[in-house]
Image (cartoon, rainbow, N blue to C red):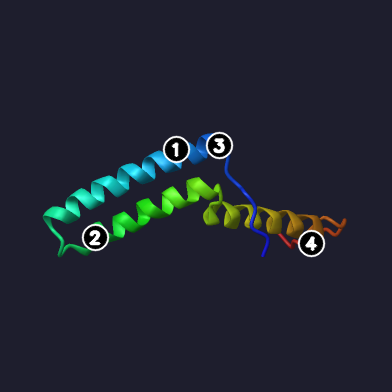
Amino acid sequence: MNIRQNIGILNSLIRITAGLTILAWATAKMVKRPWRDSYLFMAMMGAMKVGEGIVRYCPMTALYEKGQEMMEERQSADDDGFIPYNPS
C-alpha cells in the first residue's frame, strides 16, 4: 500500500483548524457531562481531522481517487470499438 500526501496545504490547515475546534468543543462538553458517549465520539472525529491535516493524507480522498481510476480503466476497456447489441 503506497501512502502519499493527497491533500494540499490550504486543505490541511482547514482540517487542523476545524479538528482543533471540534476537539475543544467536545472536551468542554465532556467536562460537564462525562457519561455522554456522543462527546467522546466527536472528540475522536476532531482528533482524526487534526491527524489528517498534520500528515496531509485523507483516506476518503484516496478511496475516491482510487474509484475514479477504476472507472477510467473500465471505460478504456469498454472503448475497444465494440458496439453492444441494442434491440430497441
Give the mark nearer the N terminus: 4 vs 2. Answer: 2
Residue underneath mark 2? 38
- Which residue does the numbered mark 4 point to in the structure image? 84
* Residue at the farthest left position: 32
User: Percent from the top left, x then y, of residue 66?
Assistant: 65, 57
- Helix, strand or loop for disc 1: helix
Q: Which residue, given by chain and number where applicable, does mark 1 sit on?
A: 14
Give whichever of 60, 77 is nearer the camera: 60
- The residue beneath circle 3 is 9
Image spot of residue 12 (x, y percent):
50, 41
Instruction: Please give left or right for residue 28 compared with residue 81 in the image.
Output: left
Which residue in the rendered view is the most extreme toward the top? 10
Q: CA distance from mark 3 to mark 2?
A: 30 Å
Task: Name the amino acid type tagged 1.
Answer: Ile
- Residues at marks 3 and 2 touching, judged by CB atoms closer than 8 Å: no
**Looking at the rendering, which quadrant does residue 88 occupy?**
bottom right
C-alpha separation, residue under disc 4 versus residue under disc 1:
47 Å
Q: CA distance from mark 1 to mark 2?
A: 23 Å
Near mark 4 (Cα within 10 A), the count class, few <14, some 14-19 or many ≥20, is few
- On screen, residue 81 versus residue 21, left or right, reads right
Q: Earlier in the sequence, mark 4 or mark 1?
A: 1
Residue 23: where, in percent of width, then height? 31, 49
